[in-house]
Image (cartoon, rainbow, N blue to C red):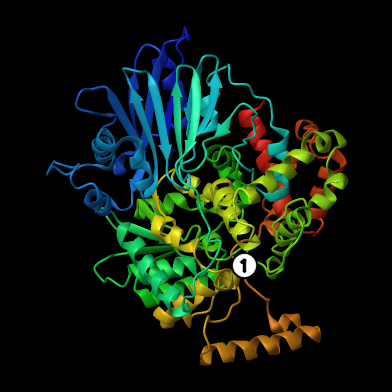
Amino acid sequence: MPGIFGFYNPNSTKPPAITLEKMLAVNDADPRFQHDTLVENDFAFGYSSLKILTTCQQPVWNNNNERAFFMIGELFDRKGLIQKFASQVKTDEPLSDVELISVLYEKVGNTLFNHLNGAFLILIWESDTKRIIIVNDRLGLYPLYYAQSGAGIIFASNIKALLVDQNVNRTVDQTAIAEFLTFDHILWQRTLLESVKLMPQASIFIFSGQHLEIRPYYHFDYLLEFPIKKDEEYIDELNFLMRQAIQRQMNGNFEKGLLLSGGLDSRYILALITENPDDKLHTFTWSIPNSDDARFAKECAQLAKSDHHFFTLEPDWLVDKAEKAVSLTSGNGNVINLHAFATLEQEAAISPVIYKGFMGDAMFGFGIRPRFWADYNPEIKMEQHLEAYRDYRVLTFDPNIHPQYMTDWFIQNSADNWREDFRSGMLACKSNQMAAQRSFFDLTQRVPRMTINGIDVVRDRCLVRLPFTDNDLVEFSLKVPPYLLYRRELVERTFIQYFPKYAKIPIAQSRLPMMTCAREIWLKNKQLVEWHLRQRGLNWLAGPISRPYKDYNGWFRHELRGMVESILLTPQALGRGYLKPEKIKELVNEQLSGENHAVRIGALITLELAHQQLVD
C-alpha cells in the first residue's frame, strides 16, 4: 500500500536501514510499488507509491540541504495555490506536488498548510535540528499511525509496520474494541493497540527532542446562525462547487475510471465528468448479477456513453482476500464493507485512477433525523444521538444488549470510556444544534475511522480521487441549513435541476426515479400491484422487493460457512474475553439457521483476523 514510514531513535543500537527495510517489507514488497528512502545514523524514513503514479524521486531537499520533503497523495488545486502564492514561486520549471510544497514551505512555513486542498501526507525532516514534521489534509484521508518508543518515535501508514519495533506494546485497547463492536468503527485516535494512535485530521505533528506535539490547523465550524438565502442560491452554488471539484481532479494522462453504483453520488460525478466528451471515462460496477445497482448503473453509463465494465461480486471473495483487506486497513474496517477490494485487480488493469462518490452522504444529510428538531438536556441529547443510530440500524451490538453478549469483565473495562468518547465526539462540534453535531461527528469520526477503509483497500492498486472532499465543497456543506440536508434534499434537488435525464433513471435505494415522470408513475403502480400480490401470499408472482448488490447473510450460510466456523469457533477466538463464548456460538448457529447477523459476524471475523496479525 502507498504511504510514509519511518522512525527516529537516538538510542537505537540496530542499523536504521535494516529496521526501515523491515517496515517497508511488512507494508508490501510488491514490485508495483516504488520505495524511496532517507537513512542516517539514528533515523530512517521511507516513501512507498505505485510506480505508475510516481512523479519524482523523493525526498526533495531545499536549496541548502537542511530540509527533506516526502509526500504521498496529491493536491487538488495546484493552479489556485500557485496563484495565491505567485510572488513566492519564481521558477518556470514544472514542479511536482512535493516540489511545490518544498518551495512554498521555505517561504511561508506552517501557515502554508491551511491553504492546501488535497488528500495527502507530508513529511519534513529538518536535519540541522533533528525535527520531524508531518502534516495531513483536513480530512485525514491518508491514515498515519504512530507509537512512541523509548526516546524516539515510529510511524507508518499501516500498524503492522510499527510492530517490527519490539518496544511497541501489543496490549489491546478494550475501549477501541467496544467502540468497534458498537458502531462498526473505532472513535477518536484509538486503535486496537493501546500504544498505537492515529494521527488526527488537519494536524501538524512535530517530534523534537524526545517530545511529541500535535497541533490542529483547521476545525470544521458549522454555522450557528443562518442567513436569509433562497433555496435556488444553495442549489446553484452546490452545482458550481461540484463542477469545480471535478475539474480540479481531472489532471493526468491516465485512463480514468469511476466506481458507479445505483446511487446518487457516483451518478453526480458521472454526469459532470462526461459533460466534456473529450474526457474518456471507464465506469465499473461490481455486484450480484442483475442487482438493482447493476441495472441502474448500466443505464446511467449508457446515457453518459462511458466505457462500462461489470464485475460479478463473487460470494466467496473473502476466502482469499479477507486477511489482506484486514491488513490494509489495520483492522479498522468490517470485512463486509470492504468489497471494493474484491474486483480491484480487474479494475486496476483498465484504469490506475479511480473516482468514488465517497463522503457525499456524510456531508449532505445522511445522518440527519427529525428527532434533532428539539432541545434536550445534555444526557438525553446523547441518548437521542444514539437513537438516530438506531433509526438507521447502524449499531452492530446495540448498547442495550451489551450485557447479554459481552462479558462482565469487558463491560467493566470499557463501558464508561466508549460512552465518553461518543459524547465528546459530538460536543467537539462547538455547536448546540444536534444536526450540526451529527454531521460533524460523521466527518470527524465515521468518515476517517470507517468509510475511509473502503478507500484504503483500493489504494493498494490505484490512485483514488474523491471529488466530494474538495475543501471548498466541504466548507459549503458546513453552511447548509438542516432542512436542506434532511433526506439529502439539497443534493437531490440540485441533481434533478441540472441533470434531469439521469434523475429519471431509478435510484437503487427506492427503485424509483428521483423526479416525477411517466416512468415514476408506472413503477409506483407496479410496486403497488406487487404489494397486493404479497398480501395474498403470491410472492412468487410479485418478485423480490429489491435486488441487493451483496448477500453476506446468504454467503455466510453457504459459500463462506467454512470460513466463519474456522475463524470464529476456535478456542483462541472464543477465549478473547470480549463476548461470551456461548454467545459467539449462538450467533454463528443462528446465522447458519437462517437469521441475519452478517454485520456482527463480519465484525467478529475482522477482530479475530486483526488479533492474529497485530496482537498474537
Q: Position of residue 169 (x, y in %)?
A: 63, 21
Q: How many marks?
A: 1
As helix, strand or loop, the secondary structure at mark 1 comes to: loop
Name the residue at 64% across, 43% down.
186
| Residue 5 percent across, percent down from the top left | 43, 28
Q: Quadrant of residue 488?
A: bottom right
Q: Mark 1 points at which residue?
A: 548
Task: Depth check: give the residue in front, 98 or 257.
Answer: 98
Q: Quadrant of the C terminus?
A: top right
Q: Which of 312 and 142 is in front in this view?
A: 142
Question: Furthest-left residue in view?
Answer: 92
At label 1, counting other C-alpha atoms closer than 10 Å, the crowd grade (few under 14, some 14-19, many 20 or more) is some
Q: In this view, does 500 lie to the left or right of 291?
A: left
What residue is at 46 percent from the left and 9 percent from the top?
Answer: 14
Compared with residue 503, is residue 391 higher up or lower down, i.e. above or below? above
Q: In which quarter of the image is the N terminus?
A: top left
Q: Given the image, on which type of amino acid does mark 1 rest?
A: Pro
The residue furthest top is: 13
Residue 582 spot, x, y in % from top left = 87, 41
Tell me if 11 is positioned left or right of 511 in this view: left
- Is 245 placed left or right of 595 in the picture? left
Q: Does the rendering let one see residue 223?
A: yes
Looking at the picture, tell me which residue is in the foreground, 246 or 102. 102
Reply above or below: 277 against 559: below
**Residue 368 position by quadrant:** bottom right
76 displayed left or right of 192: left
